[in-house]
Amino acid sequence: MQTTLPCTKVGDWGVVGHQVYINANHFALSTLNNGLSTLRGARLALEGVNRLFQLLEHLSAVLGPKLLKGQATKI
């Protein structure tokens, strides 16, 4: 009894190679997409931190003089 490989013709190996190529491209693109999503998330987080610092800067500009004068309870 003789066993045969699923790909017995040279052309069949080309189909397998093409499928491996497609799978590798799909993996590369999804990895790139995940990386871009991570960068977008990091950018949004940095923008949020920047807005928080702007808010703190504004509050310190408004409340700072009152705190120095001891009038914080009259705000």
Image (cartoon, rainbow, N blue to C red):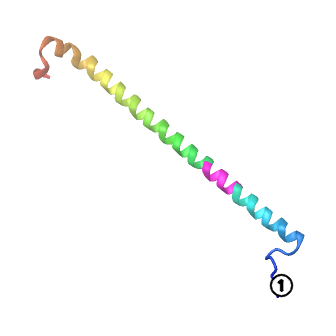
Prevailing secondary structure class for the magenta stretch in the rendered image: helix
Identify the residue at image location x=14%, y=11%: 69
Residue pushed farthest front?
A: 1
| Residue positioned 88% across, 69% down in the render | 11
In terms of image quadrants, where is residue 67? top left
Mark 1 highlights which residue?
Answer: 2
The range drawn in magenta is 25-31
Relative horizontal placement of residue 26, taking residue 63 as reference (left or right): right
Indicate the position of residue 39 as horizontal and vertical percent values: 53, 40
Q: Residue at x 80, y 82 (%)?
A: 3
**Residue 20 position within the rendered picture, expressed as x and y whole percent measured from the top left:** 74, 61
Q: Quick one: quadrant of the C terminus?
A: top left
Camera-side residue of 35 and 10: 10
**Above-or-below relation of 18 to 54:** below
Name of the residue lying farthest toward the top: 69
Residue 57 falls in which quadrant of the image? top left
